[in-house]
Image (tube, rainbow, N blue to C red):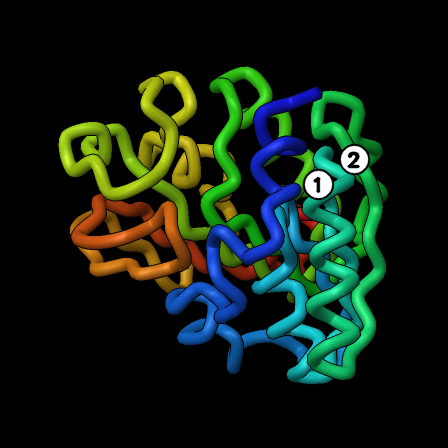
Amino acid sequence: MSSWEERFKADHYIYGTEANAFLKEMQPLLKSDGNALALAEGEGRNAVFLAQQGMKVTAWDYAASGLTKTERLAQEKGVEVKTEKVDLNDAVWEKGKWDAITCIFGHFPEKLRRKTLAGVKDAVKPGGFLVAEVYSPYQLSYGTGGPKDEQFLYKPEEFLQVFHDWRIVHFFMGEAERHEGDLHNGLSHVIQFAGQKNNSLMNR
């Protein structure tokens, strides 16, 4: 059993039930009735928030216990979220499927990270968005959440290289206060990215 499977079995929501602050800030960019994919969604707080805004949302995670809590939270909030147990190592990225993809503190080893970002690039529709907030390597010295192993932390150039031909709406690396449940608490060092896939043929 994975550590995440065990962690999400707790009765309470370890990251809380409120959506990430950066996602809330960027939500007006997104097509309100579009199809959204929430990557490594954990217990569902961000997926449920997008569903509350009218989006058709699918949540991916490899911990079944997290997906169960996603379904429970969606039911409590009176919305529908489709859940799929997906290991990103084996993910199938359908070209041009999603109006928006979110990655909120979804941390993976560098090789899988690169593979996932490339998959996201293909899977977003022209005109669609990626919205991501993740921890940078500097987060290790803050101790307010996230992986304790630097190989799981994002470097800013990963976004800038993979999405170099997208319209970058927002890009930030620096400090932010985050209070999200038990495990994200206090001043943090984050990377924020909101980018829109261009409509031109050369960038599809």
Which quarter of the picture shows residue 194?
A: bottom left
The answer to which of 7 and 37 lies nearer the viewer is 7
Q: Residue 185, how many percent across, how many down?
A: 27, 53
Q: Is 192 situated above or below 156?
A: below
Q: Which badge, 1 or 2, is on the more N-terminal residue?
A: 1
What amino acid does circle 2 point to? Val
Categorize mark 1 by other alpha carbons within 10 Å: few (<14), some (14-19), many (20+). many
The answer to which of 113 and 82 lies nearer the viewer is 82
Residue 199: which disc? none
Alpha carbons under labels 1 and 2: distance apart: 5 Å
What amino acid does circle 1 point to? Asp
Categorize mark 2 by other alpha carbons within 10 Å: few (<14), some (14-19), many (20+). some
85 on left or right of 32: right
Q: Residue 172, how many percent across, how many down?
A: 27, 54
11 on left or right of 77: left
Label 2 element class: loop
Q: Are marks 1 and 2 in contact (CB under 8 Å)?
A: yes
The residue depicted at 22 percent of the width and 44 percent of the height is 189
Q: Is 106 situated above or below 58?
A: above
Label 1 element class: strand
The residue depicted at 32 percent of the width and 46 percent of the height is 191
Q: Residue 47, how many percent across, how many down?
A: 66, 64
Residue that extends furthest to the front in the rendered view of this protein? 11
Q: Is 168 situated above or below 63?
A: below
Residue labelled with disc 1: 61
| Count of marks overlaid on the render | 2
Residue labelled with disc 2: 86
144 on left or right of 194: left
The residue depicted at 71 percent of the width and 58 percent of the height is 70
In the rendered image, the quadrant that contains the N terminus is: top right
Which quarter of the picture shows residue 71?
A: bottom right
The residue depicted at 74 percent of the width and 28 percent of the height is 87
